[in-house]
Amino acid sequence: MTNPFTILGIAGSLRRASINKAALRAAQELAPAGARIEIFDLEGIPPYNDDLWTPAPPPRVTDLKQAIHAADAVLFVTPEYNYSFSGVLKNAIDWASRPSGDNSWKGKPVAVLGASRGALGTGRAQYQLRQCFIYLEMPALNQPEVLINHANEKFDAQGNLTDQPTRERMRQQLAALVQLTQQLRAPQPVAATR
């Protein structure tokens, strides 16, 4: 690759000490050779309001849409709140999917990971988030899944991911996301006509 493969990393949390922001930083360290993760912080994106599109969209929304367009793929890192992904993440997804006919997410390969102190490691949130990918027309990486359970035992006090099996799973997921994106970009053979 002449240009680095760019994955846009978005954590669905605003909290500075978020375990999911720490997981995203770990993913940034674990990106495969030739790839990099550019982190976009959702801070400053206003609650979705259709009235805010005119005369121009909010600047942070424009920044988000430009970052999505510039990326080769997307990595969502989601917390789990009330069996679902965060409202902050849903809000960003809604802004970038609009206005009608300008869905910035369309066609972007996507992977999901998440961390929680619970036993399921954001599994319910990830599965619900995946439902959005259907409407958004985002090809989703199905395997490997990264569900970081008991996260308080897998990160140190400084927010570094210390659990080696989790680090390896993240490496595998990121490599698979790059591979999926490359496969989707590869020229498709033309079907023979009769």
Image: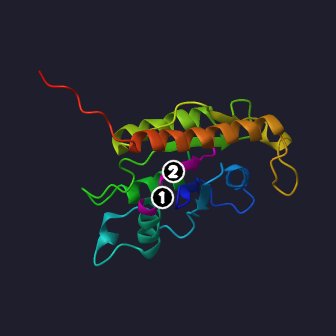
| Residue 74 in the figure: left or right of residue 20 | left
Q: Say which residue label 1 marks.
A: 71
Magenta stretch bounds: 69-80
Spot the residue most to the bottom. 55
Q: Is residue 190 visible?
A: yes
| SS state under label 1 | loop
Q: Residue at x 82, y 38 (%)?
A: 164
Percent coordinates x, y for residue 24 in the rendering = 67, 53
Q: Nearer the viewer, mark 1 or mark 2?
A: 1
Q: Is residue 117 visible?
A: no
Q: Residue at x 61, y 57 (%)?
A: 37
Q: Nearer the viewer, residue 48 or 173?
A: 173
What kind of residue is marked 2? Val
Percent coordinates x, y for residue 77 in the rendering = 61, 48
Q: Nearer the viewer, residue 37 or 184?
A: 184
Q: Say which residue label 2 marks.
A: 74
Percent coordinates x, y for residue 101 in the rendering = 24, 56
Quadrant including the C terminus: top left
What kind of residue is marked 1? Ala
| SS state under label 2 | strand
Q: Check whether the beta carbons of the residues at disc 1 and disc 2 lie within 8 A of each other.
A: yes
Q: Residue at x 71, y 63 (%)?
A: 16
